[in-house]
Amino acid sequence: MSYKVETVLKDAVSTIGESPHWDDATQTLLYVDILKGDIHRYDPANGKVDVLHLDGGVGFVLPRKKGGLLAGFGQAFVSVDWETKTVTKLAEVDLGSNIKLNDGKCDARGRVWAGTLDWQLTPHKGSLYCLDIDGSVSKQDENFTIANGMAWSPDNKTMYFIDTTPREVYAYDYDIDTGKISNRRLVVNFNDIPELCSKDVMGPDGMTIDTEGNLWVACLQGGCVAKIEPQTGKLLQKVDIPDAKRITSVCWGGKNLDELYVTTLKMHPTRATFPVIDSLDGSLFRVTGLGAHGTPAEMYRG
Ligand code: CA
């Protein structure tokens, strides 16, 4: 099967491109520039990008059913009105710490799940939170270092979740009615996959899932997206992104949800591991011809 990789936007971000979310209602792509604090909306129909700047780091962005956006902004879940540029705090986590919200996504009932990390990347300080549609926030698990990508199986009975530092993908039993997770187990470890075990690969970052239940995992410093069968932990396909190494996250987009959008990291101003380099890192990519597709991403229903 041959796939095609396009560089949709060169230098799409100036720091860390993340949290791609295909907004099915508007057929546009939302993503963030984490450290710069920018929310981007890319319209493939005309190639234009609108940018909304927030005064601080933004981990993820999602549309809200009632209109506007929901973002992970420092330690807060905030609502964002694009037109008026109003940011309203809805809930906070880990106040008084160095903890920040990182990746976030909605389950099929419109609850938001989001992980945290310590900005110094102190091990085991990260947690997994759920913002329910009634506005309440609860900690669902803890002891992660870089809480990252998440996805739900097509039957919503399993939730997948990544901690980048131990290079692991976990599965939980998921109760879609109550929004509760249980029975965490390891399903993928990059150290066990010959094509991904190199120490040059930092680990799994963001991910999405296809209608057959296979995971599509962004490989940070690996220059590829890995299609992995979670039941076996087996690598089914390695999708190479030419001339980019710092692959951060993926989502399905396009009218048939069969185009994989891929975000990347350009530079980190204070971390020596991510200096500016002469590559396509920082660009937004689109991969077609993968022979797989997703389902419309949920929006926050609170
Ligand atoms: Ca991430």
Image (cartoon, grey):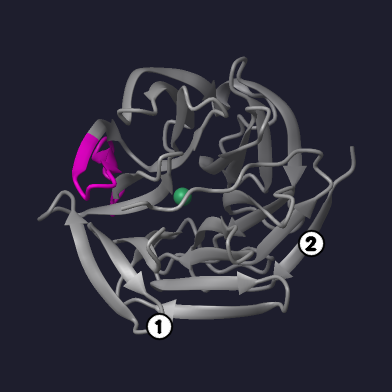
Kindly identify the amino acid type of the residue bearing the numbered disc 2: Glu
Instruction: Please name the residue shown 10% across and 55% down the image.
Output: 96
- Specify whether residue 200 is in view: no
Binning the other alpha carbons within 10 Å of mark 1 as few (below 14), some (14 to 19) or many (20 upward) gives few
Residue 198 screen position, x and y as percent: 61, 33
Instruction: Please name the residue shown 41% across and 40% down the image.
Output: 109
The relative height of residue 35 versus residue 192 in the rendered view (above or below) is: below
Q: Secondary structure at mark 1?
A: loop
- Specify whether residue 235 is in view: yes
Given residues 4 and 84, the one toward you in this image is 84
Residue at the extreme left of the image, as rendered: 96
Residue 125 within the segment the image draws in magenta: yes
Mark 2 or 1, nearer chain start: 2
The relative height of residue 267 versus residue 179 in the rendered view (above or below) is: below
Residue at the extreme right of the image, as rendered: 2
Instruction: Please name the residue shown 89% across and 43% down the image.
Output: 2
The relative height of residue 63 versus residue 291 in the rendered view (above or below) is: below
Residue carrying label 1: 83
Residue at the extreme bottom of the image, as rendered: 84
The relative height of residue 132 versus residue 235 in the rendered view (above or below) is: below
What span is in magenta? 118-139
